[in-house]
Amino acid sequence: MAREWSDDRLDALNEKVDLGFKHVDERFEQVDRRFEQVNKQFEKVGDDIRELRGEMVEMRRMMSQGFIGLAVGMASGFVALATLIVVASL
């Protein structure tokens, strides 16, 4: 048995469709807020990684300088010992 589409039925259907889209819009707003929160967290993580990389570069520079200083000190000590050995043997 076919039902006729009266203006009242069409209006009721239109209201149901509008209500359904309203719920969809609300869900999308929730998803958008979640994405904003996640983006903020990713930005913070990115900032932390950049800061960590800078600290690692600084540490690598300081270690290189320390190793060069240690090598120079050891070489100076060996030269001093060699000089003492040569002077003592004269």
Image (spheres, helix red, strand yellow):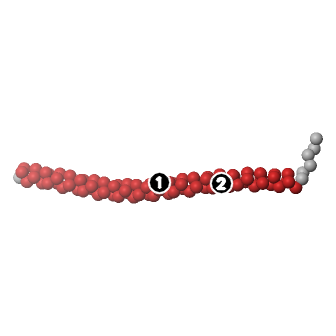
Q: Earlier in the sequence, mark 1 or mark 2?
A: 2
User: Badge 2 local density, few (<14 within 10 Å), some, or many (20+)?
Assistant: few
User: Badge 1 local density, few (<14 within 10 Å), some, or many (20+)?
Assistant: few
Nearest the eye: 90 or 51: 51
Q: Which residue bears the numbered disc 1?
A: 45
What is the secondary structure assignment of the residue under circle 2?
helix
Q: Position of residue 24 (x, y in %)?
A: 69, 52
Quadrant of the drawing holding the N terminus:
top right
Nearest the eye: 75 or 34: 34
Residue at 58%, 55% (x, y): give it.
33
Q: Residue furthest front?
A: 8
Q: Is residue 64 visible?
A: no
Nearest the eye: 42 or 51: 42
- Identify residue type, mark 1: Val
Q: Is residue 90 left or right of residue 60?
A: left
1 or 2: mark nearer the eye = 2
Q: Quadrant of residue 29?
A: bottom right
Q: Position of residue 4 (x, y in %)?
A: 92, 49
Residue at 70%, 55% (x, y): give it.
22
Number of numbered discs on residues:
2
Q: Is residue 25 left or right of residue 75?
A: right
Q: Residue furthest top?
A: 1
What is the secondary structure assignment of the residue under circle 1?
helix
Residue at 23%, 53% (x, y): give it.
70
Q: Is residue 73 left or right of residue 16?
A: left
Q: Position of residue 64 (x, y in %)?
A: 31, 55
- Identify residue type, mark 2: Glu
**C-alpha separation, residue under disc 1 versus residue under disc 2:** 29 Å
Determine which of the numbered discs, if any, sits on residue 26 in the image: 2
Determine which of the numbered discs, if any, sits on residue 1 in the image: none
